[in-house]
Amino acid sequence: MSGKYLWRLGLIVALFAGGIYLLMPTYKLLTMSQQEREKMGRQALFNLKKKALNLGLDIQGGMYIVLSVDKSKVKDPNKLKDAADRVVEVIRNRVDQLGVFEPVIQKAGQDRVIVQLPGVVSKERARNIIGKTALLEFKLLADDKVFADFLKSVDDLLRKEGGAVADTSRAGPFTRLLIGYEGDVAVLEQNWDKVDSILKLPEVKKLIPPGYQILWGRTIKTKDGKKLRKLFLVKRHTPLTGAHLVDAQATLGQQQMAGQPVVHITFDRTGAVIFARLTGENVGKRLAIVLDGVVQSAPRIQERIPTGNAQITGIPSLQEAQDLAAILRAGALPVPVKVEEERIVGPTLGADSIRRGMISLAVAFILVVLFMILYYRLAGVIAVVALFANLIFILDVMAMLNATLTMPGMAGLILTVGMAVDANVLIFERIREELRKGKSFRTALEVGYANATRTILDANITTLLTALVLMFLGVGPIRGFAIVLSIGIVVNLFTSIVMTRWIFGYLIEDRKWQAVSI
């Protein structure tokens, strides 16, 4: 088998094989169960998503949130637009760093922001990502003796107010609510409210040593399933804040922290100088890393740290470490925002959307295939091959461009199926006209393609220009529809004009067929 069209036929086969290969990650992702996703691991799943076709909120589910800027906090009305723009940028930074694929974050009016997070179905996590102020502080812990004296004074106060003459138990009225955990004072979940209410009593607040404050630690889940929070006495003065933070990265620790999630933080030059002085003057003491008033960890300063690098430890999971690092990197929101509307598009609805969309696509494809084969016979089979290639190549291009397939996009894909055969219909009818004039099939083929191509280009270019306008000026569903339509038109020109001509050329020129039934 030889001839000038043989290598072109080989190219068609290679394009088919390559196209199917590029779609394998998408197929694998769509057919994976939730258990398989969890077993796969977050990073491996993230890498798979990067190779797969992105799915929109209406297909894979997720969060839809409408935020409004607190106008009362913006004194100058002229700065409201700037404040909203900064909110959009901060939220976009946070969401991008968390690895949410194809989020939609855009302004609506002067003071509203619309956020769509495909794949995120946890209200609590979404709110933490969007609304957290991320105030990072570094505070020195009080000496153990100072803290112990404070706890004893609270016990004494409660005994006195309770009218007890003596308490023969080892623990007092307050300290019996506390436990020891990892060398610190902690409170079990069932005692949180009781301990917190005692600490908020005016009489107890007066017992706190001057220049100090009580702070809670983050929630910890022990191996036996119990929840607890540590209690810390820290200095009020904040020698260093997150204002000097330039980077924060989540990773798994090494050496003593091997396998444990940690967040590495890096300060700017000014922060590094402050941090070096802070650690140099307090070797042997403990430094509390406080995020939004909650102590994340309290490592002991082993030596002076001149590099401006530190790490936050004691984080339960790598995902929480990544969330924390993203929030720290993005910084605080410039003004408060409030949630005006939020709703969850569940994965069940997304799966149903996929199923209905695929059924529609399959029905449209089958009807077109039947019409082309019954009406144009073998030439119709060639057109069907081009149609099948058209669908594969459109999805491949979208995957390579990291475009998102939404329900309107799926509608555009179905529309493209109909448009894909339109060019072939024009070509085949032109060929038929030439055959009626008594010309040979080879001549009719050449003339038919030459005459029809000009008409096809005119029609498709005008449609493409309209689609491009919709793509660049439209938003949301309109843009999704326009993207698929634009890609479909370009791919259709190749499959309908070039690919089918190569197949005809192989049969007529290389295989020496006299004609093809049309």
Image (spheres, rainbow, N blue to C red):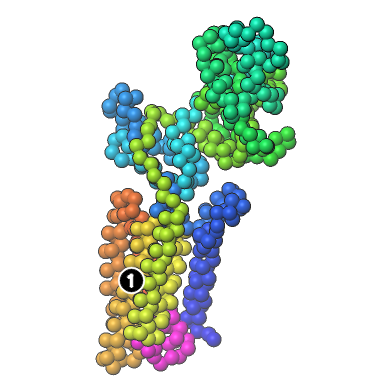
Residue 280: percent from the left, percent from the top? 67, 17
Residue 307: percent from the left, percent from the top? 64, 26
Residue at (31% x, 57% y) in the render: 468
Disc 1 secondary structure class: helix
Mark 1: few/some/many CA within 10 Å (<14, 14-19, 20+): some
Residue at (28% x, 63% y) in the render: 463
For badge 1, the amino acid type reads Gly
Q: Give the dominant element type of the magenta stretch: helix, strand or loop.
A: helix
In the image: residue 279, left or right of residue 203: right
Tell which of 272 and 34 is nearer to you: 34
Which residues make up the magenta segment? 497-518
Residue 219: percent from the left, percent from the top? 58, 31
Tell which of 51 and 345 is nearer to you: 345
Image height check: is 375 above or below 388? Answer: below
Q: Is residue 264 visible?
A: no
Residue placed under numbered mark 1 in the picture: 418
- Image quadrant for the N terminus? bottom right
Residue 208: percent from the left, percent from the top? 57, 11
- Magenta stretch: includes residue 346: no
Residue at (37% x, 64% y) in the render: 413
Tell which of 58 and 181 is nearer to you: 181
- Image quadrant for the C terminus? bottom left
As drawn, the residue found furthest toward the right would be 255
Q: Is residue 284 visible?
A: yes
- Magenta stretch: includes residue 515: yes
